[in-house]
């Protein structure tokens, strides 16, 4: 896990199934050219003009629309389906800084059995099958 893997929306690409899989591995939202994948082309947040025009690293940086409807919808979907919040991530980044956030993510998403990263899109470790215990932090 590293700070370059934290997407503008607050997603830690290091815990995404696209990044963790062996075949057709995604390099993460910040590393991927928007036209490299169909997901990159479809992501409304990655193509946000406010982010681009203001050279912002994260949606929570100086955006007057933060949190916008798109980010709220994404957050709701991830809270409901995967037990993770983009908005909480962005608030933690603001409060702690991205480096401390990443350190905390390493602990939070580490498999207690084998030490690999647990995927947010699955409730288990992709390496050993160990079940993820926590869901939302709050």
Image (tube, rainbow, N blue to C red):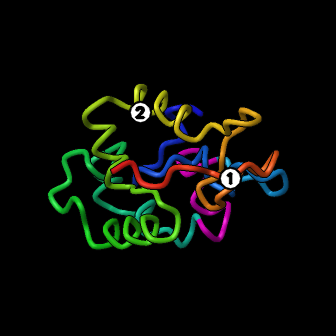
Tell me the residue at 58%/41% (across/down): 109
Disc 1, SS? loop
Whole-angstrom CA distance, mark 1 to mark 2, is 23 Å
Number of numbered callouts drawn: 2
Viewer-side residue, 2 vs 80: 80
Q: How crowded is mark 2: few (under 14 residues within 10 Å), some or many (20 or more)?
A: many
Tell me the residue at 66%/60% (across/down): 122
Residue furthest out toward the left: 64
Disc 2, SS? helix
Q: What stretch is highlighted in magenta?
A: 28-39
Viewport quadrant of the N terminus: top right
Viewer-side residue, 103 vs 62: 103
Q: In which quarter of the image is residue 14?
A: top right
Is 32 included in the stretch rendered in magenta? Answer: yes
Q: How crowded is mark 1: few (under 14 residues within 10 Å), some or many (20 or more)?
A: some
Tell me the residue at 78%/52% (across/down): 129
Residue beneath disc 2: 101
Q: Quadrant of residue 76?
A: bottom left
Is 92 above or below relative to 47? above
Is 112 included in the stretch rendered in magenta? Answer: no
Predominant SS along the magenta part? loop
Residue beneath disc 1: 131
Viewer-side residue, 112 vs 17: 112
Question: Nearer the N terminus, badge 1 or badge 2?
Answer: 2
Q: As drawn, is 13 to the left or to the right of 138?
A: right
Q: Residue 30: x, y in percent?
A: 53, 46
Is 101 above or below relative to 136? above
């Amino acid at each position: 896990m590293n700070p370059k893997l934290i997407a503008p929306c607050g997603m830690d690409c290091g815990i995404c199934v696209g990044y963790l899989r062996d075949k057709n591995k995604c390099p993460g939202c910040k590393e991927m050219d928007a036209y490299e994948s169909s997901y990159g082309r479809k992501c409304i947040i990655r193509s946000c003009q406010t982010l681009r025009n203001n050279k912002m690293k994260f949606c929570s940086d100086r955006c007057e629309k933060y949190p916008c409807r798109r980010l709220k919808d994404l957050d709701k979907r991830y809270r409901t389906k995967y037990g993770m919040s983009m908005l909480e991530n962005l608030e933690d980044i603001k409060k702690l800084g991205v480096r401390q956030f990443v350190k905390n993510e390493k602990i939070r998403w580490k498999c207690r059995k084998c030490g690999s990263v647990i995927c947010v899109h699955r409730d288990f470790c992709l390496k050993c099958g160990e079940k993820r215990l926590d869901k939302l932090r709050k």
